[in-house]
Image (tube, grey):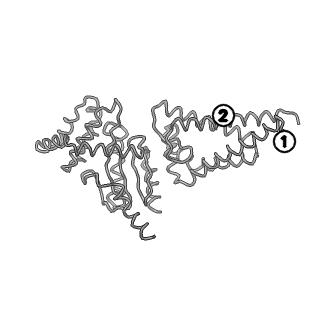
């Protein structure tokens, strides 16, 4: 029984991550004891804050150290103000297929306000890709597999349910806890450190 | 067996006191059983107090809820405890309204960390406020009665 429980605990991050996310949208060691799934929307200002100010610290403290495996999940909100969020998510997932997810994410968050209003998502993405990469990403963005990957993330988030973005779903020792408060990284760090000590 | 109206009211007050006291004690217990950071995050999500205050409240408030629950159940300091309960519930409901009007999809933070504000939380906390106001009224009405 103990062995079964131990095996399940070890498998938990892998089971929770599932086979639906390509390597391009993950960071760290898949065998890390903790799984962090970041549900984000490229139009949301809180997600920009997290991406630019908090995520580097999370990566430094937990992902690079092998304590956590980070998975990026798309959660474009279905509201009028976020009409360009889904196309942005599709392009980011398409870019992940050629290993350019982080580059495209950085670009989208950097100029979020501009393309969020103008709708020039592709122009923003194209700006950080070579001509060959642009062609590939454009083709992949029409691939039903990519569209389905985005939808799977949304469905997964709805099941939790993710009530706001950004939300990090923390999976540790078979227990899951959503976390959406990133105003103070110290609070998040204190919670994660407490979990890891258990 | 026939009960007088006064007796029925007395029984109702005791039952409601136990129910409210139990609810408050349970709310405090649930928060104490979870890592304090979860409640601090819930408080911070309302964006009405600074982070240091959210952390302070996360450490202290659950104990206050347990104490309040115990006072309601035992009937000690009845006027103070019912008045404090009503005031707290008024603040809770006010905060939930404030969050909803502000378009925030956040957790209530009432009974544990994973309970988004919804019509259910409004009905529950609204009912608790009504009961608490009734208990407060009864507590103060009894004081005015000559011995």
Question: What chain does mark 2 sit on?
Answer: B
Query: Where's residue B57, x and y in %?
Result: 57, 46
Q: Secondary structure at mark 1?
A: loop
Residue B91 sits in quarter: top right
Crowding near pointer 1: few (<14 within 10 Å), some, many (20+)?
Answer: few
B53 is higher (above) or lower (below) than A71: above
Identify the mark nearer the N-term, 1 or 2.
1
Q: Residue furthest front?
A: B1
Q: Where does the N terminus of chain A fall, quadrant-wise?
A: bottom left
B27 is higher (above) or lower (below) than B94: below
Query: Where's residue A190, x and y in %?
Result: 46, 54
Mark 2, residue position:
B130
Between residue B5 and residue A107, name the one nearer to us: B5
Query: Where's residue B86, x and y in %?
Result: 66, 36
Are the numbered discs 1 and 2 placed on the same chain, yes or no? Answer: yes
Question: What chain does mark 1 sit on?
Answer: B
What is the number of the mark on residue B1?
A: 1
Dot 1 and dot 2 residues touching (CB under 8 Å):
no
Between residue A123 and residue A95, name the one nearer to us: A95
């Amino acid at each position: 029984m103990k062995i079964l429980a131990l095996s399940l605990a070890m498998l938990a991050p892998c089971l929770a991550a599932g086979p639906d996310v390509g390597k391009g949208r993950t960071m760290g060691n898949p065998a890390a004891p903790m799984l962090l799934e970041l549900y984000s929307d490229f139009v949301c200002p809180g997600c920009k804050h997290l991406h630019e100010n908090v995520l580097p610290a999370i990566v430094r403290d937990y992902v690079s150290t092998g304590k956590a495996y980070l998975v990026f999940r798309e959660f474009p909100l279905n509201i009028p103000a976020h009409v360009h969020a889904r196309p942005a998510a599709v392009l980011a997932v398409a870019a992940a297929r050629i290993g350019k997810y982080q580059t495209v994410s950085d670009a989208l968050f950097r100029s979020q306000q501009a393309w969020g209003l103008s709708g020039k998502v592709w122009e923003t993405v194209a700006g950080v890709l070579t001509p060959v990469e642009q062609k590939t990403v454009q083709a992949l963005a029409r691939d039903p597999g990519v569209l389905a990957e985005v939808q799977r993330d949304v469905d997964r988030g709805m099941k939790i349910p993710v009530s706001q973005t950004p939300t990090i779903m923390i999976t540790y020792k078979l227990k899951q806890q959503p976390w959406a408060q990133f105003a103070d990284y110290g609070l998040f760090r204190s919670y994660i450190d407490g979990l890891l000590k258990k | 067996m026939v009960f007088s109206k006064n007796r029925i009211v007395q029984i109702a007050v005791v039952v409601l006191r136990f129910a409210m006291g139990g609810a408050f004690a349970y709310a405090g217990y649930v928060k104490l059983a979870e890592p304090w950071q979860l409640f601090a995050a819930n408080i911070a999500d309302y964006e009405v107090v600074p982070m240091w205050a959210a952390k302070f409240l996360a450490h202290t408030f659950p104990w206050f809820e347990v104490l309040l629950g115990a006072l309601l159940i035992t009937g000690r300091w009845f006027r103070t405890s019912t008045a404090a309960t009503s005031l707290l519930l008024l603040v809770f409901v006010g905060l939930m309204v404030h969050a909803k009007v502000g378009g925030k999809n956040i957790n209530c933070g009432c009974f544990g960390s994973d309970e988004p504000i919804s019509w259910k939380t409004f009905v529950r906390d609204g009912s608790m406020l009504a009961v608490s106001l009734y208990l407060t009224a009864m507590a103060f009405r009894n004081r005015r009665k000559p011995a």
